[in-house]
Image: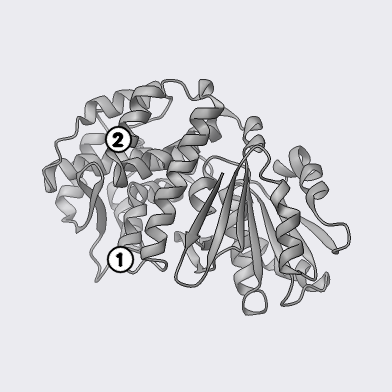
């Protein structure tokens, strides 16, 4: 399966399927890279690095740099260490970095490629469901103690190679994290897709290969369509942050890695749905959505120990905020998102309600 992403700065293919890795060698040969640097993590490397290496052309020099797993990879010292390794390996402007791992590795490796010699090529080879969102669209970043993804650049990959066989080793917690982004895509763009998910997916451990292929394809199509209109998030693309304003604040407040990204975003989506009911008049049955999410193993209540004022200060630093006003992606109806400047009192009262109730 092949999807084309048409961004303003460049167009590139996304290959999806159990044999997608076979495309990697052809891409590398076609683009005539001088050297390759694979950035992976300590979990993915031992599981799948041999398979990736076997797909690389033997005649092109390559190296591997291993970073910590998860959000610990997205730190300034790790970024600097990657740059140092690339310099010592003699990478030049015609070299290519291969991001081999989940969303965190993709974000880090993409930012390394964006910054190294003012920008070199990179290829995304994602190994998680979550990365079906983060690997497409060219957002690269690392975290700052005061905010998630605050240091980064827009830098589109040369290609995305989504070899679905790598997903077979994912633990259920990571499947849950990635699936939340598919739910997000459905909420903001496709009511029929959301109905399909809520009707057909009752157990994430029992998702079939055919179902997963459809979910990944539809999610990537939605992401690609939005990116083609607004590459640098000057307008429409901000709707991809549905659930993320509170989700990022939960991740940061609880400590990166305590909640997976998708688990935090699911809570953020429930929060945004309740805000939408009050602000835009959304008539969607939120209780049914919450019950379904709980059946899939998601927490939908705001953690009891989170203090609103602390979270609100984090939300004010969100990249959608303008003139010290928090802006949220809300839904007028499923598939019709709108960005709204929010009153602090509504945010606080809804926050308090969702610490008590799952509905």
Residue carrying label 2: 192
- In this picture, is 262 found above or below 6? above
> Quick check: 209 left or right of 283?
right
Say whether residue 264 is left or right of residue 167.
left
Q: Say which residue appears at 24% left-offset and 51% top-offset.
A: 337
Residue drawn at (51%, 62%) of the image: 138
306 or 148, which lies in front?
148
Q: Looking at the rendering, which quadrant does residue 114 occupy?
A: bottom right
> Considering the image in quadrants, where does the N terminus appear?
top right
Q: How many marks?
A: 2
- Residue 33 horizontal/vertical position (percent): 76, 69
Q: Residues within 10 Å of mark 2 (few under 14, many from 20)?
A: few
Mark 1 nearby-residue class (10 Å; few <14, some 14–19, many ≥20): few
Quadrant where the C terminus sits is: top left
Which is nearer the eye, 69 or 283? Answer: 283
Q: Residue at x 82, y 47 (%)?
A: 54
Question: Quarter of the image holding residue 84?
Answer: bottom right
- What residue is pinned by disc 1? 235
Q: What is the x, y in percent for residue 65?
A: 76, 57
Q: Is residue 305 left or right of residue 59?
A: left
Q: Nearer the viewer, mark 2 or mark 1?
A: 2
- Vertical placement of residue 212 versus 130, above or below: above
Left or right: 82, with 3 as reference point: right
């Amino acid at each position: 399966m092949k999807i084309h992403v048409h961004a303003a700065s460049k167009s590139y293919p996304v290959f999806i399927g159990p044999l997608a890795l076979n495309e990697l060698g052809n891409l590398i040969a076609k683009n005539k890279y001088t050297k390759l640097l694979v950035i992976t993590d300590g979990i993915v490397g031992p599981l799948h690095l041999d398979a990736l290496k076997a797909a690389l052309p033997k005649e092109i020099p390559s190296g591997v740099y291993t970073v910590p797993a998860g959000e610990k990879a997205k730190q300034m010292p790790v970024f600097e260490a990657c740059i140092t390794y690339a310099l010592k390996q003699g990478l030049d402007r015609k070299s290519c970095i291969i991001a081999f791992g989940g969303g965190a590795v993709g974000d880090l490796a993409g930012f390394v490629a964006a910054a190294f010699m003012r920008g070199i090529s990179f290829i995304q080879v994602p190994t998680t469901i979550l990365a079906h969102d983060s690997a497409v669209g060219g957002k690269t970043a690392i975290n700052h103690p005061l905010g998630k993804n605050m240091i980064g650049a827009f830098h589109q990959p040369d290609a995305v190679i989504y070899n679905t066989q790598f997903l077979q080793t994912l633990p259920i917690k990571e499947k849950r994290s990635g699936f939340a982004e598919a739910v997000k895509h459905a909420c903001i763009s496709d009511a029929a897709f959301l109905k399909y998910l809520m009707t057909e997916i009752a157990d994430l451990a029992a998702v079939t290969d055919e179902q997963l292929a459809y979910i990944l394809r539809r999610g990537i199509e939605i992401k690609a369509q939005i990116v083609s209109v607004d590459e640098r998030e000057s307008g429409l693309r901000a709707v991809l942050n549905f659930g993320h304003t509170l989700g990022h604040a939960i991740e940061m407040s609880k400590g990166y890695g305590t909640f997976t990204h998708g688990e935090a975003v699911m809570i953020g989506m429930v929060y945004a749905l309740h805000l939408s009911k009050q602000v835009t008049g959304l008539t969607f049955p939120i209780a049914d959505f919450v019950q379904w999410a709980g059946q899939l193993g998601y927490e939908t209540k705001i953690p009891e120990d989170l203090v609103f004022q602390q979270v609100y200060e984090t939300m004010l630093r969100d990249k959608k905020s303008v003139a010290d006003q928090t802006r949220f992606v809300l839904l007028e109806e499923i598939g019709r998102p709108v960005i709204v400047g929010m009153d602090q009192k509504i945010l606080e009262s809804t926050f308090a309600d969702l610490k008590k109730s799952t509905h």
